[in-house]
Image: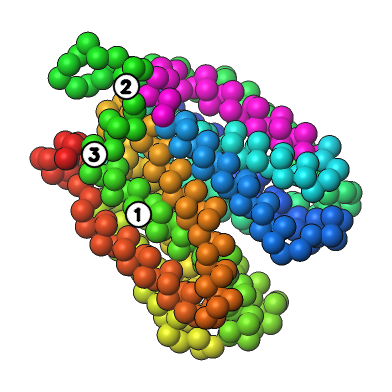
């Protein structure tokens, strides 16, 4: 067997393993959402208290990701840290079965959110080192597809069935045990990768561990630009995910059952987009695909703002609603990892994801809810469209990073 065939087989082993890793980690992030009706009944929660669970979990996830970006440049062996975070996350998720009060639930979800923050950046560093030049985008897309398949398609079925035959406490071990097994598989299957922690600057004697990693990677225009895109894209994504069901039932006056079918159709489209969008970036370049798949959701939310109560707005949601979740690997993972040197990859990746999660995932949904209460759901979708338009403009300043198509100035800090 030639070395190239061995390398390709190893690359696919990583992709499949991390497909399930990230799928089960994200299932944990969504598990409480699927348990909401049960938790409301047991703990007597109001809407604000339900929202606080997501805010605490996502906020801790985002803060941990940003903090990790400050120290990731000192990590020479990403496999070791990935194993630790995956296994401790699994154990902590399992221990959620011991929760007895709402306060304990908040504390547990905050802790687990913090533990999950560094996992995706570490996964993508390992994949980027194994991927060929023209397959990294596809690899990232397939790993992201794990979220759709494991967490969004099968997750609700698994969790609701467990609740129906047992108690809500048993939901957490149901995915914590497979995640723990995955952590052990990472130990066995993933090869050790040594990342140099020495600066690639002209002064070779400078030790990156003594430098502020953030001040180093923000010199790259792609990192600054992708951070802006991350904030507005995450804001638009959570606007759609959280409030589209209300839009469909209260504005378009569909039944809950019909809304479920419409949302499922959007989810099926996401299965296609999750692989298609990153793969198209492997073929045509990161920059044009990023711009196009920010522009289409911007147009979709604009149609939802201007054509409420019509089939046009429903179709716009089905076609464009899931695109933002599937273009995320391009702006938050692929471009940052292809922009910076090895010792900054995990740091830059973590920072771009973290700023988007903390502003777009943790705080903007609360702002969007206030906007909807004040002026209605359709105008709120118009606000989301305006944010995405900012992302479209920002994407025009991205320096192409696709090998073979990158510009001469790619990788040069401005």
Q: Point out the stretch of residues depicted in magenta.
A: 70-97
Q: Position of residue 111 (x, y in %)?
A: 65, 36
Q: Residue at x 41, y 29 (%)?
A: 70
Return the disc, 1 or 3, that comes first in the chain's sequence.
3
For image coordinates 71% across by 51% down, the residue present is 32
User: Which mark, residue 211?
Assistant: 2
Q: Is residue 225 left or right of residue 181?
A: left
Q: Which mark is residue 229?
A: 1
Nearest the viewer among 280 and 72 is 72
User: Do callouts 2 and 1 mark residues in contact (Cβ within 8 Å)?
Assistant: no
Residue at the right extreme?
Answer: 166
Disc 3 on helix, strand or loop?
A: loop
Indicate which disc residue 220 carries. 3
Measured Cα–Cα span from mark 1 to mark 3: 15 Å
User: Which badge, 2 or 1, is on the more N-terminal residue?
Assistant: 2
Q: Is residue 34 magenta?
A: no
């Amino acid at each position: 067997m030639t070395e190239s065939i061995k390398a390709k087989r190893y690359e696919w082993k990583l992709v499949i393993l991390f497909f399930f890793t990230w799928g089960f980690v994200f299932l944990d992030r969504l598990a409480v959402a699927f348990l909401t009706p049960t938790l409301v009944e047991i703990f007597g929660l109001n809407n604000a208290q339900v929202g606080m669970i997501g805010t605490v979990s996502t906020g801790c996830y985002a803060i941990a990701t940003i903090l990790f970006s400050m120290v990731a440049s000192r990590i020479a062996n990403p496999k070791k840290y990935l194993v630790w975070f995956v296994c401790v996350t699994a154990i902590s998720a399992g221990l959620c079965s011991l929760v007895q009060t709402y306060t304990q639930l908040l504390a547990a979800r905050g802790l687990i959110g913090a533990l999950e923050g560094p996992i995706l950046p570490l996964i993508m560093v390992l994949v980027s080192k194994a991927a060929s030049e023209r397959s990294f985008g596809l690899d990232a897309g397939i790993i992201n597809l794990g979220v759709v398949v494991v967490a969004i398609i099968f997750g609700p079925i698994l969790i609701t069935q467990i609740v129906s035959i047992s108690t809500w406490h048993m939901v957490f071990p149901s995915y914590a045990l497979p995640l723990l097994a995955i952590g052990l598989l990472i130990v066995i299957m993933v090869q050790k990768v040594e990342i140099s922690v020495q600066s690639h600057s002209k002064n070779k004697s400078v030790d990156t561990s003594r430098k502020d990693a953030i001040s180093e990677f923000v010199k790259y225009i792609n990192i600054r630009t992708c951070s802006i895109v991350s904030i507005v894209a995450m804001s638009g994504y959570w606007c759609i995910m959280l409030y589209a069901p209300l839009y469909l039932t209260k504005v378009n006056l569909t039944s809950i059952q019909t809304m479920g079918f419409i949302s499922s159709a959007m989810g099926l489209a996401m299965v296609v987009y999750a692989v298609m969008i990153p793969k198209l970036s492997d073929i045509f370049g990161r920059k044009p695909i990023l711009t196009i798949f920010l522009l289409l959701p911007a147009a979709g939310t604009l149609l939802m703002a201007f054509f409420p109560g019509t089939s046009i707005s429903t179709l716009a949601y089905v076609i464009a609603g899931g695109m933002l979740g599937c273009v995320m690997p391009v702006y938050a993972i692929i471009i940052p990892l292809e922009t910076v040197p090895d010792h900054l990859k995990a740091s830059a990746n973590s920072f771009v994801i973290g700023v988007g999660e903390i502003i777009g995932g943790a705080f903007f949904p609360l702002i969007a809810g206030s906007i909807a209460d004040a002026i209605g759901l359709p105008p709120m979708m118009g606000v989301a469209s305006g944010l995405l338009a900012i992302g479209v403009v920002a994407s025009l300043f991205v320096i192409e990073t696709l090998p073979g198509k990158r510009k001469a100035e790619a990788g040069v800090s401005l």
